[in-house]
Amino acid sequence: MAARAELAARAAALATAGTPFVWATVVRATKPTSAKAGDSAIVLGDGQLDGFVGGDCAESTVRAQALEVLTTGEARLLRITPTPEVSPDEGMVTVHNPCLSGGTLDIFLEAAVPLPVVAVYGHAPIASALLGAVRRTGRESPARTGGSGGAAGGRTDAGAGTHAGRAGHRRALGT
């Protein structure tokens, strides 16, 4: 279980840093397979896979499917099977993979994509309403920049009305 805890710690660090990734978890394994239910991995946007969800055949399929999930942001149930299925289950992506193991894996792929950081420019009523709405949801508050009162709550860059957000992303509203 130490490997699972290490993977969870890595996922938490990636989320804190604002790095998008896909969490892949084996939910069912039909023998013979090297992976077992509960095995998991993290797949980064560059294709790096950390963890275990099966041998080389399964890993390459998980990597390709995870990169699609990262692009769409939509979770996916993936079945990797040595026998082509005529009518796969609804909502499941089935990939025929003629690996020597001969087993079938069902793997849940879930994207962890950070929310964008937004900068609110000025002190107009709409700016205050936007800040209030974000605070009521319990999410990270955007920073207010510019306007006659200067920056209130965040580092402003040389460009008026911009705020350097998480991971260097920049967004501006009301400019």
Image (cartoon, helix red, strand yellow):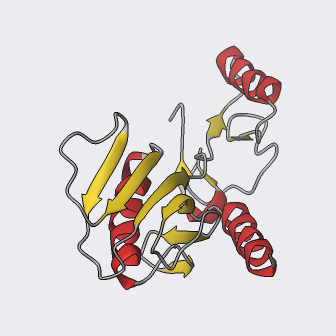
Residue 161, picture quadrant: top right
**Residue under the point 64% across and 55% down:** 165
Residue 122, picture quadrant: top right
User: Which of the pair 113/85 is nearer the observer?
Assistant: 85
The mark total stands at 0
User: Which of the pair 164/74 is nearer the observer?
Assistant: 74
Residue 59: % across, % down = 41, 76
Residue 41: % across, % down = 58, 71
**Residue under the point 52% across and 73% down:** 53
**Residue under the point 81% across and 23% down:** 136
Residue 49: % across, % down = 50, 78
User: Which of the pair 120/86 is nearer the observer?
Assistant: 86
Q: Is residue 172 above or below residue 167?
A: above
Q: The N terminus appears in which quarter of the rendering?
A: bottom right
Does 140 sit left or right of 93 as displayed?
right
Does 14 sit left or right of 174 as displayed?
right
Residue 144: % across, % down = 73, 39
Does 57 sit left or right of 169 as displayed?
left
Does 129 sit left or right of 20 as displayed?
right
User: Which of the pair 13/81 is nearer the observer?
Assistant: 81
Which residue lies most toward the front here? 31
Q: Is residue 169 above or below residue 50?
A: above
**Residue under the point 33% across and 69% down:** 61
Q: Is residue 109 above or below residue 131?
A: below
Residue 46, picture quadrant: bottom left
